[in-house]
Amino acid sequence: MDFLKIYDDFIRARVVFSENKINTEGLDSILKNMDSLLKKYDVAPIDALGEIFDPNLHEAISVVIDPDLDDNTIIKEIRKGYISQKRVIRPTLVEISKKG
């Protein structure tokens, strides 16, 4: 879904602007409208951080050794995934843990 790529770009821009103390009011307004549009079409983000990897919802692109975490715990979201009406539109790209 091309819309999600544009949405991601706006979110990244807001983060960079905030980090550099640049006013984000305009971006916040655009993102609010985009959030409303996603909600209107029943598109929701997939919560992944701290969850156990599910190949139906997530795509693991990196593994980190961490003996303190259970295998396949999601420790980082690389790119947010989205679901609509129980159908994955785009899986979440994640980094997962392995005990070693």
Image: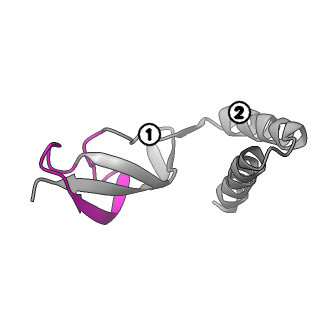
CA–CA distance in space, label 1 to label 2 = 15 Å
Q: Report the span colored magenta.
A: 51-72
Residue 74: image x %, image y %? 31, 47
Q: Residue at x 71, y 58 (%)?
A: 9
Q: Residue at x 15, y 49 (%)?
A: 71
Residue 42: image x %, image y %? 61, 35
Q: Which residue is mark 1?
A: 86
Asked if residue 34 can be seen in this view, the reply is: yes
Q: Residue at x 25, y 42 (%)?
A: 52
Secondary structure found at label 1: loop
Secondary structure found at label 2: helix
Residue type for callout 1: Lys
Residue count near mark 1 (Cα–Cα under 10 Å), binned few <14, some 14–19, many ≥20 = few
Residue 51: image x %, image y %? 30, 39
Q: Examine the residues drawn in magenta and state their main secondary structure.
A: loop
Answer yes or no: do the residues labelled 1 and 2 have beta carbons within 8 Å? no
Q: Which residue is mark 2?
A: 40
